[in-house]
Amino acid sequence: VLAGSWARLAPLLRPSQWRKPAIATHRVLATTTGLLYVCGALLVMATLCLPDRGAADVAPMWGLVAIALAIGATTLAVGRRFPHGMYHVLVGAGTVIITLLVLLAGGGSLSLAYGSLYVFVAIDCFFFFAWPAAMLHLVAFEVLSALASRHVGLGFSGILLQQGCAAVVALVVGWLARAAAQAERDPLTSLLNRRGFDRAFADALDAAHHSQTVLSLVLFDVDFFKQVNDTLGHLGGDRLLQQGSQAWSALLRADQKLARYGGDEFALILPGCPSDRAGAIADQLRAALQPQGVTCSAGVAERQPGDSASMLFSRADVALYEAKSNGRAQTSIYGRPGRRGAEELEQAVRAGQLEMYYQPIVDLATSREIGAEALVRWNHPDRGLVMPNDFIPQAEQSGAIHAVGRWTLMAACRHAAREQRRTGALWHVSVNVAGAELRRPDYPVLVAETMEQTGLTSAALTLEVTETTFDTETDVVATCLQQVRRLGVRVAIDDFGTGHSTLSRLDRIPADALKIDRSFVQALPADGGPAPVLEAIVALARALHLTTVAEGIETARQATTLRALGCSHGQGYLFGRPGPARTGSVVTQRTSAAAVTRT
Ligand code: C2E
Ligand code: MG
Ligand code: MG
């Protein structure tokens, strides 16, 4: 039994475990120390009020109680701002106060009882201090307590039991605190694991909130780690992670907490660092991986007032995603456009790597195609066909959206003009426009010039604007759309129902059509049951004199229901998937309704 216990205890006594347990954050330290002071003071107060307190001189004892209460209350209120060293002073002061009480009690059972308060000191220092410091406190209070107890004439057996109890409690608490902290460590790298990170992150955010200081979060992802594992084997991959995290830990300060968040994902909390400095630290850490022969990508985000942990984390995640999609081996700062990505995309526009796909829009009453929505694709030389959701958001951030938008508008108008000439009928084309484009004062001029150059009738063009575009600079966007409509171009509100609070300003948005988001269509009951939300949207559109286009219609039943509800137009895989324009033939890849129902 002893050997087994030692085997479990020994690892926790290794020099690597000598540091203070991870649990010793300022918040926990302040609360625990403050509470121990207050509880100790209240207990002593109670003994002073009881009749059996003996002949002790109570006046100075009341003084000590008042001091202890004051220290406890102050620590509870502002203790989280104390430097860590201050807690050594507080624990030392506790030892002195208890020793004075033992002396003032003048011996007998009351002195022995006050001596039991040393357990509070034992708990506090072994919970929060590194082993060597905690041991020094233990020796100090054991010596003081022994001297004081002897001075007031306590017997050896009483002293031995009291001292022994305090020492045993101290060691057990120290061991338990470290064992609990182990659960927050990653066994491979000894860094914080996900659980430890979550706690450290919450504490750091709390501290930043209270001290009104900056804080940044960096997320790292090793590039092509799967290939590393495939070539070096899992042991090789593990070794790489170990060496990498050792190299990184050596570069960081104690308050900069590094965690292994997932397989090859790391998170770094940087208190007091604005995003630029965090970006520089991230670059330094990335460079430190060079000897390992791998690169990694990093995403940085800075805390904004009112941020929750998940909000800050997801912004850092967006930045990391941007770093990866811009070609990896780089650091990206949230909200700071990555120039490299922008240049690559602008170059792609010039090199003709963008391609327009068209998806038919039909009149639901007749199922006749009246036009199509233009949806851009990027034929990337390495990444293959890249979908718009994977590059448009970044293009909006980096400013490359203007080059992309000019190209898409021109390509769609040219194609529609050709269709119009070929069929001799009005063929509508819908083009998606990003908010950043509409905030450029010369956008209406661009639209007018494009129509002139391509010879397209303005009534054939619809600009699709998502609801969220109106969240910022609503007036600027609305003015731009009014000017565009004066040219005869139509405006549709895209993905209607997914944004927020548009309803309150819907009548002020210059629009001609509502595109009902496909989530509503997909939520239609399969048995043709009631669909009150869809019904309300169609009624709303009718009241505002807007036509309706339902997106994402995949089944004949959905089309029938929408038609019955009074929705005028539809779009979705039932009528055709987005496909490349084929000159001189049918515009879109048509999928027959039967084929869709079969799949
Ligand atoms: P959106 O304007 O709402 O386009 C509709 C999206 O739904 C398209 O995805 C389309 O392929 C997809 N879709 C259509 N019918 C169905 C269906 O029956 N079922 C399902 N599950 N999906 C369907 P895509 O092409 O990936 O485009 C995604 C978004 O990217 C578009 O959403 C639009 O907001 C944006 N986008 C596309 N092209 C451009 C562009 O040229 N400029 C800008 N600024 N944004 C664009
Ligand atoms: Mg659209
Ligand atoms: Mg849409």
Image (cartoon, rainbow, N blue to C red):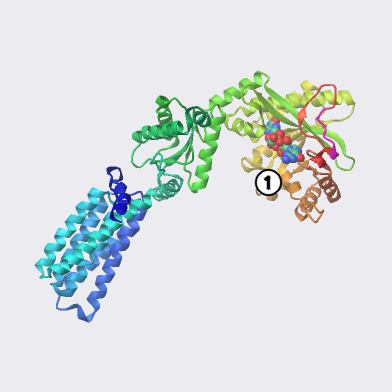
Q: What stretch is highlighted in magenta?
A: 587-594
Q: Quadrant of residue 367?
A: top right
Nearer-the-camera pick, 232 or 317? 232
Nearer-the-camera pick, 514 or 30? 30
Q: SS at mark 1? A: loop
* Spot occupied by residue 426 in the image (x, y as percentages of width and height): 86, 30
Q: Is residue 482 visible?
A: no
Q: Which amino acid does label 1 sit on?
A: Thr
Q: Is residue 412 visible?
A: yes
Numbered label tally? 1
Ligand 1, what quadrant? top right
Nearer-the-camera pick, 110 or 468? 110
Asked if 566 appears above or below 124 in the picture, the reply is above
Q: Is residue 574 magenta?
A: no
Principal secondary structure, stretch drawn in magenta: loop
**Quadrant location, the N terminus:** bottom left
- For disc 1, the marked residue is 498
Instruction: Residue at the far bottom: name it.
Output: 51
Seen at 80% across and 44% down, the residue is 546
* Spot occupied by residue 353 in the image (x, y as percentages of width and height): 67, 21
State yes or no: Cβ of the residue under disc 1 lies below 8 Å from any atom of ligand 3. Answer: no
Seen at 66% across and 32% down, the residue is 388
On the rendered structure, is 595 left or right of 508?
Answer: right
Q: Is residue 588 magenta?
A: yes
**Quadrant location, the C terminus:** top right
On the rendered structure, is 58 left or right of 81?
Answer: left
Asked if 415 appears above or below 185 in the picture, the reply is above
Q: Are there few (<14), some (14-19), or many (20+) residues within 10 Å of tag 1? A: some
Nearer-the-camera pick, 159 or 414? 159
* Spot occupied by residue 77 in the image (x, y as percentages of width and height): 34, 58
Asked if 144 appears above or below 557 in the picture, the reply is below
